[in-house]
Structures are given as structure tokens and as C-alpha cells.
Image (spheres, rainbow, N blue to C red):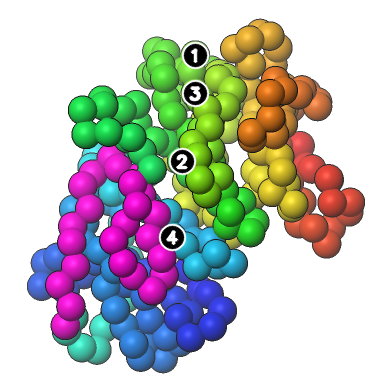
Amino acid sequence: RWLAGAVELVYADQQDGQDFLVVAGRDGAGRRALVTYDGYLQFTVAPEAGLIALQAIDESRAPAAQVITAAFQDDFEDVVDAIPQDELSIIATFGGEPFILYPPTDDFTPSPVLAFYWSPDGSSLAWLLQIDDGDGDCASETALYEVQFWTGDTIIAGPRFRPTATFACNYVPFFDQLDQSTSFWSPDGQLFTFAGTDQLSGERGVWTFRPGSFESATRIAEGEIGVWSPDNAGSAGASAL
């Protein structure tokens, strides 16, 4: 992922058989490892906040088998810690110790974190938990998801819903690859959208939810998927279905 500023590129790399998450300048200068990991790394970057959300999963759960690595020039001088699999964390682009968001405690048996999404300004992170996998077929719309939110100082549980086949099969598995082209957050970071059947009402459609409010999700339209347009395309509240 390209960024603005002195640290301009965040990428996965491999050296001497060990996998790393790396930051570097445009010409490769200042190349520095942030963490090591085993398996398949998923990460998204919040450029405005200088934060990276990351999770390592078993390679058998990866949406694609191919891993592209970048060339390097020098060996890493600093020793960095390994992150465990199935643990959603955030880390600053300049490094430091990862902050664990999920699971909340060591003795907690988590549901898988399927995808995670930064708000436009990086002040909030949303992630999807699989509460029930249904019959195991993403196209059947029988799985049950829950949205959770980190708002910088607290974690909030959001709606539970059964995702549409389009959302579950075509968007969720590839969330990190679609990170720069698809946003489920409104441009002002106040609303999050999802598509499926709301557990409370039993209605199917495209929904919006305001994290931190005491409101239920709001159904705005019929549809298979909903994404927000950029703030310079249409109104600030525009969405595409």
C-alpha cells in the first residue's frame, strides 16, 4: 500500500525463510520490519492516522495461494516480535508493539475475524465476526455475521445479519485487496453499510448503522451489496447499490 510522506510503502516481504510486514520509502530507503508472522497476512492501512490493522491466518483459509514479495536491499537490523494467528491487532506505521483488538482475552475462544475496514480518517475500525457458519456455503445466505467497531477508546458490538451471497462470496474474502477501491464507511466516517438479512427484523436489503448510537440498523434499499461513493462524487451521503 502506497502512502504519503517519508514512509511511503507498506508491504509483506520474506527474508531467510521468515515473513515480515515492512515499511519503506519510495526508493527502498529506511526499510524496516514491523512484525513477523506465519501463514497468510491480511492488512489494511489508515494513512490519515498512520495505523495498520493486521491479522495472520492459516494459509488454508487464504483466498488465494499466490504471495507476491518485494525485493530488499539490506538485512533487518532490529529484532521484531511474531504475531500469533487469528489475532486482530493495530500497529503504527513507525513501529512499536501491536495493540490487540480481538480476541479480547487469552482465554476467549474467538469466532473468526473475516474482514476489517478502516473509516476514512482512521479513527474507527470495523470488523466482521462469523457467529454461525450456517451450512458452510457462502452462497446460501445461512451464515450469521456480527459487526464490531473500535472507536479509538472502546469496542462496540453492532448488528447481526445473514449476508447476501454477493457480499459473503465476492467481497468479504478479498477485503484487503479491495481496500483502496471499495468503502463500506460513509465519507464522514459516521455510518457503516452492510447487505443481508437483519437478525432482529428479518428483513433483507442494504443497511446502514451508526456506531455508538442506540439505534438499530436502518434499511435503505433492496440490493445485494452497498458501497459508499467518495466524498467528491455526488452528495456526502451518496451510496451505490
Q: Distance between the residues labelled 2 and 4?
A: 14 Å
| 181 relative position to 57: left or right | right
Q: Looking at the image, is 114 positioned above or below residue 181?
A: above
Q: Distance between the residues labelled 4 and 1?
A: 32 Å
Tell me if residue 172 can be seen.
no
Foreground residue among 93 and 58 = 93
Mark 4 or mark 3, which is nearer the start of the sequence?
Answer: 4
Question: Which quarter of the picture shows residue 23?
Answer: bottom left
Taking the magenta stretch, the answer to whether it contains residue 183 is: no
Q: How far apart are marks 1 and 3 (CA)?
A: 10 Å
Question: Which quarter of the picture shows residue 134?
Answer: top left
**Secondary structure under the numbered disc 1 in the rendered image:** loop
Mark 1 or mark 2, which is nearer the start of the sequence?
Answer: 2
- The circle drawn on residue 145 is 3
Residue shown at 28% from the left, 49% from the top: 56
Mark 1 or mark 4, which is nearer the start of the sequence?
Answer: 4
Residue linked to disc 4: 52
Closer to the eye: label 3 or 4: 4
Q: Looking at the image, is 75 positioned above or below residue 210?
A: below
Q: What residue type is labelled 1?
A: Thr
Residue linked to disc 2: 115
Q: Looking at the image, is 238 positioned above or below residue 51?
A: above
- The circle drawn on residue 80 is none
- Residue 65 position within the rendered picture, expressed as x and y whole percent measured from the top left: 29, 50
Q: Give the range drawn in magenta.
A: 77-100
